[in-house]
Image (spheres, grey):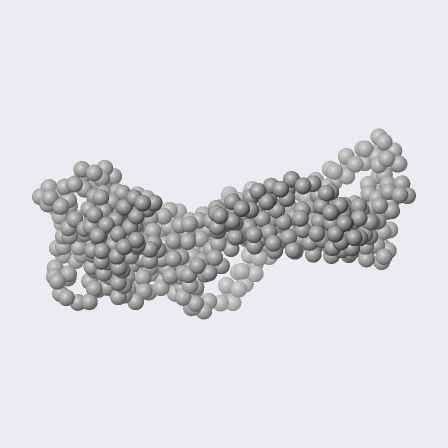
Amino acid sequence: MTTVRADALLDRLGRVGQFLWSGWAGLAGLALFAALWQAGHERYGDFILPAPLATLAAGLTIAADPAAWELAGQTTLRAVEGFALAALAGAAGGLAAGYSPATMRLARPILTVLLGVPPIAWIVLAMIWFGSTDGTIITTVLVAATPVVFVGVAEGAVTRDRGLDDMARAFGAGPLTRLTTLGLRHVAAFLFPALTVALGSAFKVAVMAELLANTGGIGGALAAARANLDVAEALAWVLIAVTGLIVVEYTLVHPIRSEFERWRNAARPWGVKR
Amino acid sequence: MTRETTGAAPSLTLSGIGHAYLGRTVLDAVDLSLAAGEVAALVGPSGCGKSTLAHIAAGVVEPSRGRVARRYRRHGMVFQDPRLLPWATARANIAYPLRLLGLPRAERRERAEEAAKRVALDRADLDKFPVELSGGMRQRAAIARALAIDPDFIYFDEPFTALDVALKRRMQDLVIEAARGARFGALFITHDLMEAVRIAHRVVVMDAQGRGIAGTRAVPGEPGGRDDGTVYRLVAGFLTDDPLFRHIHDIDERRTP
């Protein structure tokens, strides 16, 4: 029994190591981006595009200020609240639509309408409804992120393997057991990519809504930087927002997803994993 | 063979089963009864509704008409394709029905490994995912899954059709061995008369249009006790002398005599 546990632990450690090692490729990509940025800086000068190092320094200055952390925390909280609501609403709706074709037929046009309205229009509407409060931001994020999750989950539920359902029924599984042991497990593989996209758009929409609705947070700080024509500070705030997103994505979303996708990884030949 | 005339309580009774898909009748007035511990092979041309009948008997499909009386304790099922959960290891797949029964984790593990041993599935393969296993290994895992719950009845729905000849033979031996050891009854759907004669106590022939059972023939001897010569002679005898099997030969071009 203990050897089994040790084996499992070693296996897990190996996979964590593999994940960390794959970080080098990401770092190389980011370095390439920074090089292009530096080239742009040298071509257009300090005012249009400050150097990446200068931006980093400005970012570090901001990061040293506790008030800035409060602003970033405000944005993160709003984005995550809106994201959580969107994930719940999208997952529930998508599951219902995936299992019931009638719901799907009703939901599809609504989805088209929701996706057709530009986010900026939702911000204007939400500002009228909620004023300059958290509600405006959360509503905008909710409207922007829900369809993504909905479509992902519905697609997962529609593509579930009915043969497995029959197998489970032959072994005496009721509808609820089939949903929890087969349906949800299959949908999870579709849910996680959708959640990644939804989280990214939640952050972006939150910052945009903050800027337009003038409700503080990172968007508010960006608005202030624009008023002062402080390009380095504006870029530094963008850097901070992007860093926050990357941290959330690689410490939370990716590890969970790779845990769910272990079997898919197992099918790949050695050497081309990830 | 007096198995069907001993009068012991039947383990499975299908009476007046009828079924229709989208208004098209595929099964009508099928009556079939299996004695306890009896292995019956259900043969018939493809498309005659054999699989549907097995699905109805196993409770996967609700029949439009008729009654299913199950007097066994618990059944397992093996399908034509393995139907393993792609995200679970072979061990977890074999243990899946045990999980449905609500057994504790340690016991599930133990019984899954025991079932894997019975189908000669290597212990090292139990930690692999279905994509990493060969076709034969996957079907072994599917059989082990059916055996793990310790059933007294198993439905086989053309389980070895996709396997090559040598592998098919080994799988048949495996089922014969398991049926003898665990004394379970079975309804074995196949379109291969050789397979039916090797494995079963009785061959049941279905009507080509699914209108009931055309007839039934007891196979002399015990499953596993018949050698290849006997099996060939029996099949040849059925095909040449018995009018019951004549229409199978005409319609089912996939049968391999």
**Whole-percent x, y for residue B206 in the image:** 20, 48
User: At 87% from the left edge and 47% from the top edge, which residue is drawn?
Assistant: A224
> Please, is residue B104 above or below residue A40 in the view?
below
Q: Nearer the viewer, residue B70 or A7?
A: B70
Report whether residue A85 is seen.
Answer: yes
In the displayed structure image, the side of residue A14 where residue A208 appears, left or right: right
Query: In the figure, is residue A143 to the left or right of A153?
Result: right
Q: Percent x, y for residue A161? A: 44, 49
The residue that appears at 33% across and 48% down in the rendered structure is B80
Image x and y of residue B232, in percent: 15, 45
Looking at the image, which residue sits at the far top? A43
Please name whichever residue, A73 or A43, is drawn nearer the observer in this view of the structure: A73
Pick the quarter of the image with the N terminus of chain B: bottom left
Q: Which residue sits furthest left?
A: B241
Q: Is residue A83 left or right of residue B63?
A: right
Q: Which corner quadrant of the image does residue A40 belong to?
A: top right
Compare residues B127 and A150 and report the one nearer the observer.
A150
Furthest-right residue in this view: A228
Is A88 situated left or right of B17 in this image? right
The x and y percentages for residue A174 are 42, 61
Q: Is residue B121 visible?
A: no
Residue at left 27%, top 60%?
Answer: B68
- In the displayed structure, B168 sits above or below B114; it is above
